[in-house]
Image (cartoon, rainbow, N blue to C red):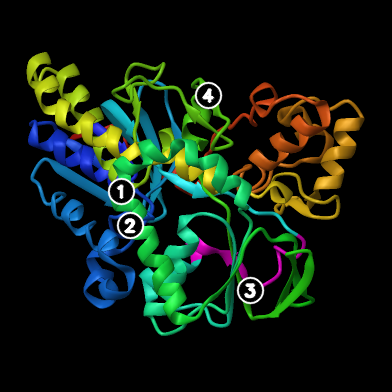
Amino acid sequence: MIEADLVIIGAGPAGMAAAAQAADCGLSVLILDEQPRPGGQIYRDVDRAAPRHGAILGKDYTDGLGLTDRLDHPNIACLFGTSVWQIDPQAAVSFSRDGRGGVARGKRLLIATGAQERPMPLPGWTLPGVMTAGAAQILLKASGVVAERAVLVGTGPLLYLVAAQMVRAGTPPLALVETQTRSDFLRSLRHLPAALLGSRTLLKGMGLLATLRKAGVKRYKAAKDIAVEGTDRVTGLRFAHGGQPHQLECDTVLLHHGVVPETQATRSLNLPHRWNARQRAFHPVTDRWGRTALPFIFVAGDGAGIGGAKAAAYEGTLAALEIARDLGALSDGDRDLAAHPLRLRLWMERAIRPFLDTAFPSFAAALAPADDTLVCRCEEVTAGAVRRYAALGCLGPNQLKAFGRPGMGPCQGRMCALTVTELLAVHHGTSPKTIGLQRVRPPLKPVTLGEIAAMEGQGEQSTL
């Protein structure tokens, strides 16, 4: 068993910032992360990719170097390539690495697992050649490969960022097929005064759109009736725009209609979660320092509610300050003095979220897909099947597992849970808040019996 003052799950902006702050306060820190190098998804592989592709990926990406540099600290130990598969309420973490199981225990635990892209189930979304926009960006960061003859579909600022990066890489997308409408934009204007506090983000967005216009990338807004075409792989995209049918030939379709908190770990602990109607997602309930209902466990970053990379770093730092105070490394006064400017920056960073969430809502047709569209890819359950089970008397997602197994495959509901909740809510005429989400049981990730057996004899302790 490895022991540390603070164990952090996730080496994204929140986890890295928290580790650096805690280490500076004199705490021993252990970071566990699945990737081979730090950065999370937003700064994925930044140490290696920034020198090669920094001009393509942009300054917001290369800013991650400032966080990875701070991990070079004698109080910080990192176990990369580590898969966490169980978390104990007393802050013990079971993990696998290099084919062996292990356990880490912290006096405090910070869950900084970030966000995931919201699945966008549409007709044809399971065809080879369809991926998320975020996955295409990861491909660029990790290997410099750019999707060719691609159409970006959905809504949200990430579409513009990925499209602009493709332009800079010399392989612009064929088109953007966007689902947000003029009415969405008009509704968002009431949030514009607050959004001006995030003028840097607004200006960046305008710059991305200017890049796309200069490159001649076609944009189709308020698209409807979207379907991916093809038999063995993608051959095109069909949609309606301006009341007219359109068809684009392409080899790749990149889907995106928002990101949602990654809550598998927090739900496995049965922590209270709250429904965010604007972001149409659940997130764990925390106090202003990130502390959950289990006092030893904290959550920071997008896993506690979508706010972006800079907000995540501020939240991670705030959580670390409170943890340092908990463990006697900081006084209340020193904690509050350090936290005050961070709270101001965090407030300004989050001020733009209501504007963005309203201007770029999730695509309604993907929240409640057509009957013949797969929603659970692992168990091949369609939206129509979920509706039939609801008509038979199924009231919630956990009961639904007994009816048709959605959420019981290898991804354990990561891909279908929110869609299933939305479908049941619509059928029963209630809200997703009332329906709730599937319960998560360990293991969080697949683990072999050999890895568990390899944990025998690990009773000896190693303290960082």
- Mark 2 and mark 3: Cα distance apart in space: 33 Å
Whichever of callouts 1 and 3 sits on the residue coming sooner in the sequence is 3
Q: Quadrant of the N terminus?
A: top left
Tag 3, which secondary structure? loop
Q: Position of residue 414 (x, y in %)?
A: 59, 45
- Mark 1 and mark 3: Cα distance apart in space: 36 Å
Pick the front one: 70 or 269: 70
Q: Determine if residue 39 is in view.
A: yes
Q: Which residue is mark 2?
A: 203
Q: Are marks 4 and 3 in contact (CB under 8 Å)?
A: no
User: What range is drawn magenta here?
Assistant: 123-135
Q: Quadrant of residue 312?
A: top left
Q: Is residue 345 left or right of residue 328?
A: right
Q: Is residue 321 left or right of residue 243?
A: left
Q: Nearer the viewer, mark 1 or mark 3?
A: 1
Q: Amino acid at mark 2?
A: Leu
Pick the front one: 356 or 444: 356
Q: Determine if residue 306 is in view.
A: no
Q: Are marks 1 and 3 in contact (CB under 8 Å)?
A: no
Q: Amino acid at mark 3?
A: Gly
- Mark 4 and mark 2: Cα distance apart in space: 32 Å
Q: Which residue is mark 1?
A: 199
Q: Which residue is mark 3?
A: 129
Q: Which residue is mark 4?
A: 274
Q: Amino acid at mark 4?
A: Arg
Pick the front one: 260 or 272: 260
- Mark 4 and mark 3: Cα distance apart in space: 35 Å
Q: Amino acid at mark 1?
A: Ser
Q: Quadrant of the C terminus?
A: top left
